[in-house]
Image (cartoon, helix red, strand yellow):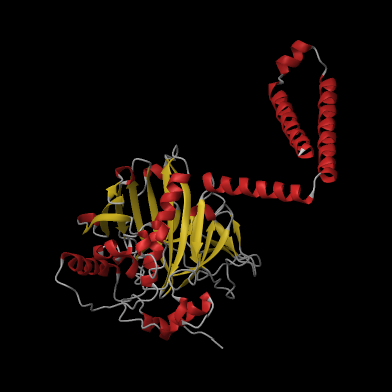
Amino acid sequence: MAKTTRIVKMTIKTILWILLINLAGMMVSASVLENLKVPLLEVGELWLTATQDLLNGMKNGITTLIHDCSIWSYIGIVALAYLVYKVYLLLFAPMNRVRLLHEVGYCDDSYHKQSAKDVCNTVKKQRRVGDCPPCYPNGWFAVIDSHDLKVGAVKNVSCLGLNLAVFRGEDGRAHVVDAYCPHLGAHLAVGGTVVGDCIQCPFHGWEFNGDTGKCTRIPTTNKIPDVARVKAYNTLELNGYVNIWHHAEGSDPTWTPPEFEEITNGTWKYRGRTEHYVNAHIEEVPENGADLAHLPLIHQPLIVAGVDLRYCYSKIWNFGQHKWIANWEQESGPDFHIGTLTLQHSLRLFGIKLSMLDIKVAARQIGPGLVYMTFNSMFARGAFVHSLTPVEPLVQRMIHQVWCEWYIPPIIPKFFLFGEAMMIERDMMIWNNKQYNGRPVLAKSKEDALIQKHRRWYSQFYSENSPTIESIAKSKATLDW
């Protein structure tokens, strides 16, 4: 115990020395030196001497630590450091919860102890798809989180049946182009580099402008063919994402997602994200917002009941319930592409309503691939910015970012984000195993009428050439040997 106490005292002493020296360095100024009449050379010698003494002290402290500590002391120090690191991540670092396709939403007790990946693949092969609408609707879709695309970075992204090279030019603007060089077919995002606002092919150095896709330089000649270009996509960086406009007929954007001014001006700060992969048709996910009848069943049990629907209805958790009051409406006029779900959440424990935990939510479905969900409670005000992007015909990448007022402790919006993730993962157990019913049997009720209303609204995002599962299967040449 005495040795440990001595080591702790030495560590504290070393830290105090470092702080003292830094403080002294900040306090020294030209006017002070002039008043003290100390030559600059002597000041430098004093700094060198102090630094040498500090390094010697640290060396002696490390030597003492090595010779005097037992193995248990080392284990305790490592455990303490790990605990401090975890507490820091919990309290201050942005959350990053990622769940891959095979990690959530399957029952493995029917597949003879297969691995999670094998269960996922088996479900994908055996499940009936149903009579699905087209797989890739028209609209704005997020291809990457803004904070994941640094200046000069190039990212390889596959979505919407496309292979894309996403890069940020030296001027800070994001660009998205087709991934394959028209010269000899090299992948621009695999080894490609950024030159100004262009991307350079790693194979022969051809450079393509991010805005137009036109080739601007060929190292071996000054004569650039007019057809030397890649497809450049309409790109919009907004609310934490880099988005592209996708349209089956190649039409220009007919609407633009609204901007969160609080995100743009820094009033709200980024506090984390969740990322899930869903084994379902894209329309299943937004339709969930208009399916009010599932709320009191799927989302009533407490968060602590977990996400496995086989167990979360256990009587063990009956002492508490989430309650929801909800409505979905489509908007008209210039906002015809927006549908809005309004939610009021409350929590009851042992039949007593905890009003302090009431949350009001307004979730705006912006086209087929974006949801802006604002929340307001006595603890915080902010938004979930939700993106949904098809990475395969029946696999969707779903991301939720949470943004909150800058002065709110990060642990609060992170807890909200965790709760949202738990509710989503319950839905995924339904989505990952269901078929799409194009002609469902509906009850004569307000709730089922909303589902039909939502499907009519969502149909505006399909057009004559929107790719279907059948057309994709015919056009996609693969070598699955």
Between 282 and 214, the one lying in front of the other is: 282
For image coordinates 28% across by 48% down, the residue present is 352
The C terminus - image quarter: bottom right
Q: Nearer the viewer, residue 376 or 171?
A: 376
* Position of residue 419 measured from the top left corner of the image (x, y, whole percent): 41, 55
Q: Residue at x 66, y 67 (%)?
A: 220
**Residue 369 in sight:** no
Report the side of 165 relative to 23 (left or right): left
- The residue positioned 34% from the left and 66% from the top of the image is 285
Q: Is residue 167 above or below residue 259?
A: below
Quarter of the picture containing the N terminus is top right
- Most extreme residue toward the left, as rendered? 444
Q: Nearer the viewer, residue 248 or 469?
A: 469
**Which residue is located at x 35 percent, y 63 percent?**
315
Q: Position of residue 451 (x, y in %)?
A: 22, 68
Residue 142, image quadrant:
bottom left
Expressed as whole percent of the image width and height from the top left, the position of residue 125 reads 44, 84
- The x, y position of residue 179, in whole percent, is 53, 69
Q: Nearer the viewer, residue 454 or 139?
A: 454
Q: Can you see residue 209?
A: yes
**Left or right of 194 on screen, residue 35:** right
Task: Answer with the quarter of the image where residue 53 lies.
Answer: top right
Horizontally, residue 29 falls left or right of residue 430, namely right
Question: Which residue is the extreme one toward the bottom?
Answer: 481
Up/down of 302 relative to 181, above or below? above
